[in-house]
Image (tube, helix red, strand yellow):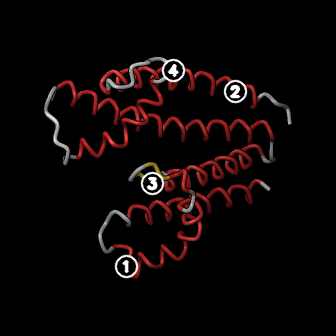
Amino acid sequence: MTTLFSLIAAAIVIYTILCFIDIIMTWIPGAKYTKFGQTIAKITEPYLRVFSKWKWTHVGYIDFSPIISLGILSLASSIFGSMASNGRFLFGNALGEIIRQIWGLCSSLLTFLLILILVRFIVILIKKNQYDYNSMWAQLDNFLRPLAQKIAKPFYKNQNNYQNCLLASLLILIAVLFLGNILTGILVHLCRSIPF
């Protein structure tokens, strides 16, 4: 049974690598149209297409569906790897791994958002009154402004001051990441102590 779980975990890791290659090829003009690109796409596109259809994975111009699809493959690989090391399926270990992987995915997205907000906040501090409506900063603001206002709303009532909303969002996201890491560690430990 251990060998079977190990083989399944290894197959999922290989498929994850193929999906990652397919995702990277979308960034290289013409790569998807090569024979290699088409072969990889035949293998991976049916799986990746499931997630790209979900509208909630698209925020503005950013598509988070590849991250979610790779996260789910990573979760499956971890569960089967855990089953291979234990020789059997343990509900507590699987539940703990699911919680750990979900938080890993969420914390990655939150960290990415935190970095975007931090960079934009620093640029606003450096370039006080200079604003080009055709710049990439304007595009980033179209994405960040509504998010920062929603994040800061419970703690900061003046939604018109974008700079303060960014600062409040930074502090809130840092607190959420810190507390989330602690809570996730506690939950994973509790789940793994389940005897079945």
How crowded is the residue under tag 1: few (<14 C-alpha within 10 Å), some, or many (20+)?
Answer: few
Depicted 113 relative to depicted 8: above or below:
above
Question: Is the C-beta separation of discs 2 and 4 under 8 Å?
Answer: no
Does any portion of residue 189 appear in the rendered image? Answer: yes
Q: Residue at x 44, y 66 (%)?
A: 22
How crowded is the residue under tag 3: few (<14 C-alpha within 10 Å), some, or many (20+)?
Answer: some
Mark 1 or 4: in front is 4
Amino acid at pointer 2: Leu
Give the mark nearest the N terminus, 1 or 2.
1
Question: Is the C-beta separation of discs 1 and 4 under 8 Å?
Answer: no
Kindly identify which residue carries mark 2.
187
The image quarter in which residue 16 lies: bottom right
Indicate the quadrant containing the C terminus: top left, top right, bottom left or bottom right: top right
Amino acid at pointer 1: Tyr
Residue 55 in picture, x, y percent from top left: 54, 55
Kindly identify which residue carries mark 3.
63
Depicted 12 relative to depicted 40: above or below:
above
The CA span between labels 3 and 4 is: 27 Å
Kindly identify which residue carries mark 4.
154
Amino acid at pointer 4: Pro
Does any portion of residue 14 appear in the rendered image? Answer: no
Residue farthest bottom in this picture: 35
Kindly identify which residue carries mark 1.
33
Tell me if 19 is positioned left or right of 195 in this view.
left
Give the mark nearest the N terminus, 3 or 4.
3
Q: Residue at x 34, y 73 (%)?
A: 31
